[in-house]
Amino acid sequence: MIHLIVYFNGARSRWSGRAHPEEMLLEETMPWRWLARMRGQQVVRSFIAGRVGWAICTPDGQVLEQSDPTPEG
């Protein structure tokens, strides 16, 4: 199983270089990586505000893919 995390790229996430638990907006479990990627892109596009990104992780927390947060403005 693959974990999808959509997060706000605030100060804590920028400092650590990964999604901080307090800045997570959505966390879902998906059976396939391609499905998690599509869902992450869909959710990020639904936000009007910038600085929202997504990451795909293994169950033990290893990041497989991470998108750059959307630009502001």
Image (cartoon, rainbow, N blue to C red):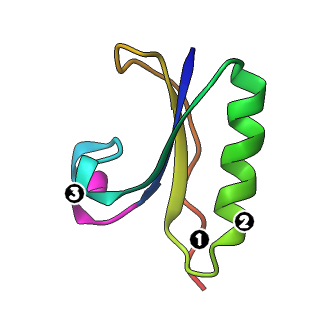
Which residue is rendered at x = 35% and y = 45% of the image?
19
- In magenta, the rendered stretch is 9-14
Where residue 55 appears, x then y in whole percent? 52, 38
Where residue 22 appears, x then y in whole percent? 24, 56
Q: Check whether the beta carbons of the residues at disc 3 and disc 2 lie within 8 A of each other.
A: no
Q: Secondary structure at mark 1?
A: loop
Tell me the amino acid under the disc marked 2.
Arg
Mark 1 or mark 2: name the one nearer the start of the chain: 2
Query: Label 2 belongs to which residue?
Result: 45
Where residue 26 appears, x then y in whole percent? 48, 51
Mark 3 or mark 1: name the one nearer the start of the chain: 3
Q: Check whether the beta carbons of the residues at disc 3 and disc 1 lie within 8 A of each other.
A: no
Quarter of the image with the C terminus is bottom right
Above-or-below relation of 56 to 12: above
Which residue is rendered at x = 27% and y = 48% of the image?
20
Q: Secondary structure at mark 2?
A: helix
Tell me the amino acid under the disc marked 1.
Pro
Label number found at residue 71: 1
Q: Depth-wise, is mark 3 or mark 1 nearer the camera? A: 3
Instruction: State left or right for residue 68 relative to residue 16.
Output: right
Q: Depth-wise, is mark 3 or mark 2 nearer the camera? A: 2
Above-or-below relation of 13 to 50: above
Label number found at residue 12: 3
**Nearer-the-camera pick, 39 or 49:** 39
